[in-house]
Amino acid sequence: MRVVDLIIKKRNGDVLKRDEIKYFIKGYVKGKIPDYQMSAMLMAIYFKGMNIKETKYLTMEMVNSGSIVDLSSIPGIKVDKHSTGGVGDTTTLALAPMVAAAGVPIAKMSGRGLGHTGGTIDKLEAIEGFNTEVSLEKFIKIVKKIGVSVISPTLNLTPADKKLYALRDVTGTIDSIPLIVSSIMSKKIAAGADKIVLDVTTGSGAFMKDYKDSLKLAKIMVKIGVELGKETIAVISNMEEPLGFAIGNSLEVKEAINVLKEKGPEDLRNLCLILGAYMLKLGGIAKTVQEGEIRLIDVLRKGLAFKKFKEIVAEHGGKVKMVENPELLPSAKYCFKLKGKKSGYIQKIDSRLVGKSAMLLGAGREEKESSIDLSVGIVLKKKVNSKTTSSEVLAEIYYNNPEKLEDAKKALFSSFKIGREKPEKLPLIFATVDKEGVKE
Ligand code: URA
Ligand code: CA
């Protein structure tokens, strides 16, 4: 087999066979196939696409490129959740303890933030002492003991994805459906859960800005998951505006605590209830989604989800006191109140710009190696549909470095669009996709 022949085959729009896909993934990970040939292959895939079978084989080969986590010693059906990315997406912090408190084991590996999106691992590290880099043995031990653990990946999972993602990033081949699907699904499958709930975000802060593209992506991910023996459900959620009010690590931990104490923002709570209900259904704890939601509401009301969060913190060596008194969490020195200078209704809050503003303050990473400030961020005081006057505060900016304030202010100010008419309220969930089909 010659790599150039495979590139030509894909360039001509032909279908690649399993052994051909295996050959170029293996060769690339081993360093036998150079970046320039892989770049050409990625561009051919970008333009010619891949059918379901090819996408499935690509996903399998990416899984096989590294270790696979074995969670079989943990009793029960392990359900994982993955979001395709957003701004102020505090979901995992609240969802993991909620679902675990309701009886589904959660053995979750999460990532760090990059660019305008945040990452769960950074957020958890806002809690002093919280160790996210525990060994696999300890991770499994914690899940067996308290039903839940969230860590950053320890094993060498899907090295093919790490290499390919970096190459896609610099060759203009990120937004290709077969490449996104194989990237996300290979990581989820290698992480070892039995079943998967996907939160496919759509809108200004998401990977896919357009609902139709998000739906297409969701359908293919569900199909690949199911074909590879991991029942998968996808929820398509609104990321036209940031989720909840808080954007920034420490601020989002506080927001998650509020959700767990039933004082949190409605959109974040509702998204957690819906995603969680599907997780309970897949985990065999609830017969229907409605039943799942009722169970989760009960778990919140009885304080069991908040208790579970404190257990997670304790097991990971974090200061539980900080969770009991969130004012002890890292907080920024200064607060600037951003006013709208206009009266009317909030039409739009561009999530990408809000994320960028938080990143400029230091809450996120410009480059993979950048260090971050866990205490800074943004708290929205208005969301889409809110009424505002020229003197009202749109958002609070929490910052430490006055030099960073001006650019952050500019990005944040331009994210708000204010107009006279009350806009149509977008739904939180546009559709759900499971093996039976799409429900809109
Ligand atoms: N997230 C991933 O992990 N991979 C992609 O390709 C896109 C989003
Ligand atoms: Ca938030």
Image: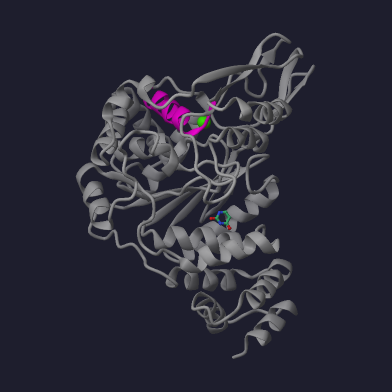
Q: Where is residue 167 in the image (x, y as percent from the top left)?
A: 61, 65
Residue 429 picture quarter: top right
Q: Residue at x 69, y 74 (%)?
A: 40
Question: Is residue 393 depicted above or below 250 in this figure?
Answer: above
Q: Where is residue 151 in the image (x, y as percent from the top left)?
A: 35, 48
Give the quarter of the figure containing the N terminus: bottom right
Question: Is residue 285 depicted above or below 27 in this figure?
Answer: above
Left or right of 261 in this view: 375: right
Question: Is residue 110 depicted above or below 263 in this figure?
Answer: below
* Residue reaching furthest to the right: 420
Q: Position of residue 121 (x, y in %)?
A: 42, 44
Q: Which of 189 and 2 is in front in this view?
A: 2
Residue 251 falls inside the magenta stretch: yes
* Ligand 1 rendered quadrant: bottom right
Q: Which residue is drawn at 72% across and 10% down?
A: 389
Residue 54 picture quarter: bottom right
Q: Residue at x 47, y 29 (%)?
A: 375
Decide whether the magenta segment is chiefly helix, strand or loop: helix
Give the quarter of the figure containing the C terminus: top right
Residues in magenta, as a range: 245-261
Residue 83 falls inside the magenta stretch: no
